[in-house]
Amino acid sequence: VNKGGIGQVGYPLVADIKHEICQAYDVEAAGGVAFRGSFLIDTAGTVRHQVVNDLPLGRNIDEMLRMVDALQFHEAHGEVCPAGWSKGKAGMNASTAGVAQYLADHAA
């Protein structure tokens, strides 16, 4: 860490020396620089959420963690997460009736 590293992590890190990953996810900018991209991929290999920022804009890790929580909630309960959802809040059924019930239950 003292020499610019990040220390020990509990997940794999990947080097994209040939730029294959950034090209596959369409985040390579002119000159071979990769935009700041975050991709949330489910257990089936489907991209469920992606955020790609231009070089001067940083990412929001709290929002990415919220998306991880939302995907895990959906996979565990089969419900969808409404706008503004956060861990511990209710989900809803993805139907007209489910939305109506959610709105009725959560009216201000």
Image (cartoon, rainbow, N blue to C red):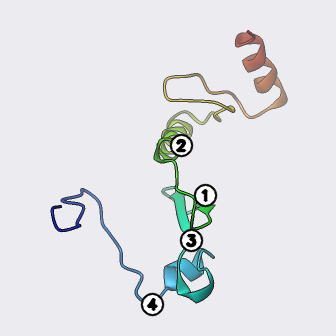
Residue hosting label 3: 35
Q: Identify residue type, mark 3.
A: Phe
Any mark on residue 63, and which? Answer: 2
Q: CA distance from mark 1 to mark 2?
A: 10 Å
The residue positioned 54% from the left and 60% from the top of the image is 39
* Mark 1–mark 2 CB contact (< 8 Å): yes
Which SS class for mark 2? helix
- Determine which quarter of the picture holds residue 48: bottom right
Query: In which quadrant is the N terminus drawn?
Result: bottom left
Q: CA distance from mark 1 to mark 4?
A: 22 Å
Q: Mark 1 or 2 closer to N-term?
A: 1
- Indicate whether 52 appears above or below 95: below
Residue hosting label 1: 51
Q: Mark 4 or 2 closer to N-term?
A: 4
- Determine which quarter of the picture holds residue 50: bottom right
In percent of width and height, residue 8 lies at 18, 59
Residue hosting label 4: 18
Q: Mark 1 or 4 closer to N-term?
A: 4
* Mark 4–mark 2 CB contact (< 8 Å): no
The residue positioned 54% from the left and 64% from the top of the image is 37
- Determine which quarter of the picture holds residue 32: bottom right
On screen, residue 99 versus residue 15, left or right, reads: right
Q: CA distance from mark 3 to mark 2?
A: 18 Å
In the foreground, 60 or 95: 60
Which SS class for mark 4? loop
On screen, residue 71 versus residue 96, left or right, reads: left
Query: In which quadrant is the C terminus drawn?
Result: top right
Which SS class for mark 1? strand
Judged by depth in the image, the label closer to the viewer, 3 or 2, is 3
Label 3 CA crowd tier, 10 Å (few <14, some 14–19, many 20+)? some
Q: CA distance from mark 1 to mark 3?
A: 10 Å
In percent of width and height, residue 52 lies at 61, 63
